[in-house]
Image (cartoon, rainbow, N blue to C red):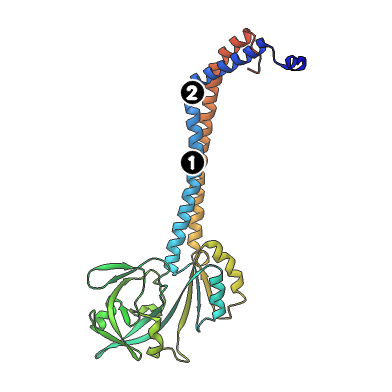
Amino acid sequence: MSDAIGTAPPPAEARRGMGALTLSLRGMRRDLRAADVRALFVALALAVAASTMIGFFLDRLERGLERQAGQMLGGDLVLEQARPFEDVLRQTLREAGLTLSEQVGMVSMASHEDAFQPTSLKVIDDNYPLYGEVHVDRGAGVELLSRGPAPGEAWLAPRLAQLLEVELGDRVQVGQTRLEVTALVEREPDQSGGFANFNPRLMMHQADIEASGLVQPGSRIEFSLLARGAPSEVDAVLPRLRGLTADGVEVRDVRRDRPQLGNALSRAEQYLSLAGLAAVLLAGVAVAMATRRYVERHLDTAALLRCFGAPSVN
């Protein structure tokens, strides 16, 4: 019992400790209402918010630019060659988490009654398009569709429809098959240039390509395999493609095929980082000024407390 009583703090010391704590709490409550302390908190909040918002905005900007570039390219990764792709290549891309879409492109002849016209034929599958929408007119104005023509259908460029003198509901001859014109293509999400695309567009489904008889030995055809996925997935699968693709295969991805994308992102990052640094520096100056005013305002109070015998720790 005597040991327990001996270790207890003296009543006077306990009262002094409680008094110092009460005084500190009162001073803190009074300081929170002061303008310099509020300015200190506002400056800190602005510095943190500026750094966070710049990182968030850069991420959103990068995603938006990559999406637009992917829409122009047709996918995040595009493989092109003059013969059909092997199943092992498709399986490798699917195992990497990529969504695939296949296209066949060629120059062919389309006809309607006595009218004949060379056309840039584009054969798509059910996953087309991977990015964006197709702007079509099906008789009720321009619509945005996230699919291509169904089997048995043909979508024509307005210029091709004018040259063939066809209207919606008419049938055009493509190879050995006849397809119903169900829409006019005003704009494609992955439309590119090139000699083959100088001719007006005709889009059809891959289910009709065999019946058309257009794919023959010696035909000048371009097979395209488009993939959509996260940048990390694309970067991870690119080294594996070197051993699976033969000579004559062109591999394109958003960053390498569109170098202006990387340049735009670099410039945006530099400008935004400079703006963020300026905001942080201004916030630092505000913090320093608010801290100085806070210290100067409490010098007299601290000196008075020291005169009354308050220890420096308080």
The secondary structure type at the circle numbered 1 is: helix
Answer whether residue 116 is visible to the viewer in this image: no
Mark 2 and mark 1 in contact? Answer it, CB < 8 Å. no
Give coordinates of residue 226: x percent, y percent: 47, 73
Three-letter amino acid code at the position of disc 1 = Ala
Instruction: Give above or below for 228 relative to 82.
Output: above
The residue to which callout 2 is attached is 32
Q: Which residue is mark 1?
A: 50
Q: Residue at x 52, y 37 (%)?
A: 280
In which quarter of the view is residue 184 placed? bottom left
Quadrant of the snapshot with the C terminus: top right
Q: Is residue 246 left or right of residue 165?
A: right
Query: Between marks 2 and 1, how big is the CA–CA gap?
Result: 24 Å
Is residue 123 visible in this depiction of the protein? yes
Q: Against 183, is 295 above or below?
A: above
Secondary structure of the residue carrying numbered label 2: helix
- In the picture provided, is 310 more to the left or to the right than 162? right
- x, y percent for residue 83: 50, 84
Mark 2 or mark 1, whichever is nearer to me: 2
Q: Which labelled disc corresponds to residue 87? A: none
Q: Nearer the viewer, residue 174 or 82?
A: 174
- In percent of the image, x 51 and y 46: which residue is there? 273
In this view, the residue in front, 290 or 7, is 7
Name the kind of residue labelled 2 in the image: Leu
